[in-house]
Image (tube, grey):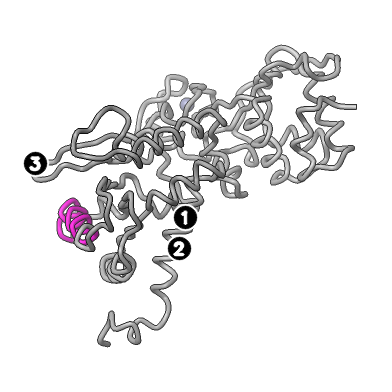
């Protein structure tokens, strides 16, 4: 017998392991409830770190756990800060108030800590954990290891049913909008901003440069070398096209040139990713152009249309997975015979 909400773990764990997890959660008291880590769970229930990590992500989604990030000084190992969102992780070089060294935290120094939201739902028990003194982040519990083990997309993009429904309702307003008057909630720009801000690794906002208006500039706070985040870079641009007809192929060239300007004509690497979001599906030239821009400049531009957004919201899909697939389509096509495609003469 175990808490019925742990049934979601059946595809990852055996009945026996779920029972052990139930018991483990039930027995936590005091600060131990807020310091659950991948390695502790792996040890407690006898599974690999990868399985433990995926199980915890599932529990997070199920609302049984919440997550926070413990930041340790790489020099003195002191816990400097505990933050609830990745956005709050300090950036750049700063002084550790423990050892006064100039430090810069990396994903190796950040520990992913899970907290039980309510352990009364598990079978009763008691277990006291004596908090260990200053120590280094256990390798398996660092953000880096947890994300490298996989499941980073599921971890960073988790929406509730209400959030998906809200996005779908918003999309339907956008779809049905006719004419030129824009009212609140019925433009792709607003929907896009909302959608990207729902991913905990992003901050999105429209910006204006001295020559252009960027519908949505997304900051990728976790400029990490894993999966899709490596392709996205630190910032990327999104252009939204509200028109009810097939968008013009020139939109892709325009976004590419805006990115090129930001990159000082190839001298810099400020932006390496762009997205065009349009109500109607883009023309086939979008993909051909995107492949050639990728080959020449290393910039990836993908396009997402209304139908795909609707599908994403309806099927409770993962935005990061969609972006990753679209980016791979551009980059992998680029490895086929490009001469035959007429993109290259040599
Ligand atoms: Zn220190």
Dividing the picture into quadrants, the one containing residue 35 is top right
Along the line of sight, the residue nearer the viewer: 256 or 191: 191
Where residue 331 sits: x, y (%)? Answer: 40, 67
Q: Which residue in the structure is indicated by mark 2?
A: 328
In the depicted structure, whether residue 36 falls above or below residue 175: above
Q: Are marks 2 and 1 in contact (CB under 8 Å)?
A: yes
**Could you tell me which quadrant the C terminus lies in?**
bottom left
Q: Which residue is mark 3?
A: 210
Q: Secondary structure at mark 2?
A: helix
| Alpha carbon separation for disc pair 2 and 3 | 32 Å
Q: Main secondary structure of the magenta part?
A: helix
**Which region is colored magenta?**
252-265
> Residue under circle 1?
324
Question: In the picture shown, does residue 121 fall above or below 276?
Answer: above
The residue positioned farthest toward the left in the image shown? 210
Q: Residue 160 appears at what percent x and percent y?
A: 56, 30
Residue that appears at 31% across and 50% down: 278
Q: CA distance from mark 1 to mark 3?
A: 31 Å
Question: Which quadrant would residue 58 be assigned to in this image?
Answer: top right
Question: What is the crowding at mark 1: few (fewer than 14 residues within 10 Å), some, or many (at least 20)?
Answer: some
Relative image position of residue 43 (x, y in whole percent): 79, 36
Q: Residue at x 22, y 58 (%)?
A: 256
């Amino acid at each position: 017998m175990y808490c019925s909400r742990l049934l979601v773990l059946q595809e990852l764990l055996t009945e026996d392991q779920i029972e052990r997890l139930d018991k483990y959660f039930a027995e936590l008291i005091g600060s131990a409830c807020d310091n659950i880590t991948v390695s502790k769970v792996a040890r407690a229930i006898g599974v690999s770190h990868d399985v433990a990590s995926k199980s915890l992500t599932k529990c997070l989604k199920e609302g049984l756990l919440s997550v926070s990030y413990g930041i340790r000084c790489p020099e003195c190992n002191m816990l400097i800060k505990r933050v609830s969102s990745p956005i709050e992780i300090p950036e750049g070089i700063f002084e550790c108030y423990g050892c006064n060294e100039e430090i810069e935290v990396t994903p190796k120094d950040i520990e992913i800590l899970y907290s039980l939201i309510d352990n009364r739902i598990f079978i009763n028990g008691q277990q006291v954990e004596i908090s260990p003194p200053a120590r280094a982040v256990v390798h398996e519990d660092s953000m880096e290891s947890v994300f490298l083990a996989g499941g980073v997309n599921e971890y960073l993009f988790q929406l509730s049913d209400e959030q998906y429904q809200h996005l779908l309702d918003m999309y339907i307003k956008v779809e049905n909008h006719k004419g030129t008057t824009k009212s609140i909630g019925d433009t792709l720009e607003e929907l896009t901003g909302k959608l990207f801000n729902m991913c905990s690794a992003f901050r999105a906002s429209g910006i204006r440069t001295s020559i252009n208006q960027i519908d949505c500039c997304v900051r990728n706070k976790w400029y990490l070398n894993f999966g899709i985040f490596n392709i996205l870079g630190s910032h990327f641009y999104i252009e939204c096209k509200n028109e009810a007809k097939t968008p013009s192929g020139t939109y892709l060239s325009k976004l590419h040139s805006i990115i090129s300007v930001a990159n000082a004509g190839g001298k810099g690497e400020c932006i390496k990713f762009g997205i065009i979001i349009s109500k109607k599906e883009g023309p086939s030239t979008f993909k051909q152009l995107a492949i050639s821009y990728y080959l020449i400049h290393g910039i990836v531009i993908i396009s997402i249309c209304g139908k795909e957004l609707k599908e994403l919201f309806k099927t409770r899909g993962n935005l990061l997975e969609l972006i990753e697939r679209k980016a791979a389509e551009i980059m992998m096509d680029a490895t086929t015979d490009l001469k035959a495609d007429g993109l290259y003469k040599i």
